[in-house]
Amino acid sequence: MQRGEGFIVLITDMFRRITHGKAGALPMVPGLLDLRNFKRALDKSRQRAERCGHPFALVTFESEGEPEGESDVKLGEEPGSPSNNSVNGLGKLARVVVDRARLSDEAGWCEGGRLGVILYGASGASARIFAESVLGNGQRERFRYVVFAYPGRDGGDGSGRPKSQESGQKDKAPEAASETESIGAKRIDACQSLFAKPHPAWKRLLDIAGSGLALLVASPFMLLAGLWIRSVSPGSVFFRQERIGRGGRPFTMLKFRTMAVDLGESRHQDYMTRVITDGEAPMTKLDARDPRIIRGGRLLRKLCIDELPQLLNVMRGDMSLVGPRPPIGYEVAKYHRWCRGRLDCTPGMTGLWQVSGKNRLTFKEMARLDIFYANNFSLWFDLMIILRTPLAIVRQLLDGLGKDQRAKGSAGNA
C-alpha cells in the first residue's frame, strides 16, 4: 500500500470512529438495528411510555469478559472496549435474539458494544423469562443480561430497579442501577443512562478549546474574585456542590462562594419544590435582600463571575460549554418523568434557557427548551448560543438594576 493510500485509509477510519464509534467492531445481523437507529427506537419507546402510558422492557446482553492478562488493549482502542471475541460471540447471540423476538419488538446495538432488545408491553418478569430463553444451551457462562422496566413498577418516580442475572449468581443491581441518594435524590431512573445522548467529538473539541481560551482570558478576574471572597468572608473561596449530569450521573460542580459558609439548603429546596410543582411560576432568583450573601456576592452573581470555575468542570468533561443547567439531586426527585429529558445530554455553563429569558421563564418552559436542545444540538446551534450569551448577561444585569431601583423607590414611598 502506498503512503498516500495509507493516509486516506487512516483519515477514513478516524472519521468512522468519530461518527459511528469503533470501525467494524459491531457485526451486521439481518433484523438487527445499528447503534443510531436502535437509539431512535429507544427514544420513541420512551416518548410513547411517557405520553400514552405504554410500558416497555429493555434487555441488554454483554459478554462476561475475558480473564485478566489475556486481553491487551490495542492501539486505537480504549480500555473496556469490546474485544473481537466478545463481539463475535454477541453477533451469534444476536441471531438468537432476532429469531426469538416478536415482530413488534426491536433489537439492536447499544453503547459499549452491548446487545439490546426492546420488548413492547412487557413487564420486568416477562423480560427476564425472555432473556433466560435466549441464554439457554450453556450461554449463561459467557454472557450476562440486565433488565430495565420503564416506567418503574410504581409508575411515578422511576423507582423500578433493574436486575441482572449472572451465571450461577443471585440477582444484583448493576452499576447502571446506582441511585443518587447523597443529597436527597430519590431513585433516579436506572434507564436514564441508556437515554443519554452521545457526546460528539466536535462538541468535546469545542469544550476543550473554548474553556481553555476562556480560562486564559478570565484568569485575572478569577484571581481578583478569589482574593475578594477571601478578604470579606472566612472559609473556602470555592463552593462545591453535587449536581446531576448526563445520564443521571452525579458530579461535583465548582462555583465561587458568594454566601456565608455552612448554610443549609432548606430554603432553596422549598423554593424549587414550589417552582417544580407549580410549573407556571417564573424562576426568579432568591438574591433579593438575602442576608446570607457576602459583600459583593450579588455583583459576582449578576455578572456570572461566580460561575467561571465551572470552566474546570468543562475541561474535566463533567460539563459542556453549552447544555442544560445541571440540577441538584433533590430537584430531580421532584421532576415529572418527562422533565428528566433534561438529563439526556451533558449539562452546560450556558444554554438555550439562559439566552431565551432565563429567570423570566417558568420551570416547564425551561424544561421544554432544554429538552429541545438535547434533541437538536449541533455545532452551529452551540456557537449561536455562545454568541448570544454575553447579550443575555447584559440583559440580566439591566433587569437586576431595574428591580433594585424599583425596590428602592417603593421603600422610599413607604
Image (tube, helix red, strand yellow):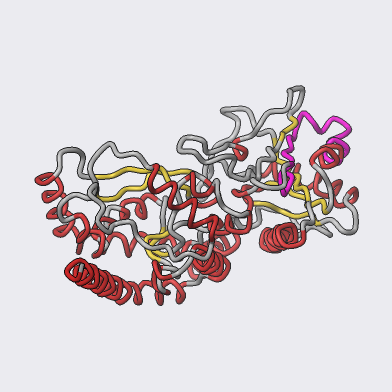
Q: Quadrant of residue 230?
A: top left
Magenta run includes residue 147: yes
Image location of residue 338, percent across then percent down:
62, 58
Picture quarter with the N terminus:
bottom right
The percent coordinates of residue 188 (x first, y second) are 58, 44
In the image: residue 368, left or right of residue 37: left
Q: Which residues are magenta?
A: 130-153
Residue 66 picture location, percent across and down: 64, 32
- Report the quarter where the C terminus lies: bottom left
Task: Indicate the quadrant where residue 23 lies.
Answer: bottom right
Front residue of 316/253: it is 253
Q: Magenta stretch: residue 175 in it?
A: no
Q: Residue at x 9, y 45 (%)?
A: 231
In this rendering, the answer to whether 373 lies above or below 176 is below
Q: Residue at x 70, y 38 (%)?
A: 162
> Residue farthest to the left?
231
Q: Residue at x 33, y 56 (%)?
A: 286
Determine if residue 66 is in view.
yes
| Residue at the extreme front | 414
Classify residue 367 as left or right of residue 44. Answer: left
Q: Is residue 114 left or right of residue 29?
A: left
Q: Nearer the viewer, residue 387 or 4?
A: 387
Work out whether 269 lies above or below 45: above
What count of labels does the image hold?
0
Left or right of 137 on screen, residue 317:
left
In the rendering, at what x and y percent does residue 360 appear? 41, 70
Residue 6 visible to an observer of this rendering: no
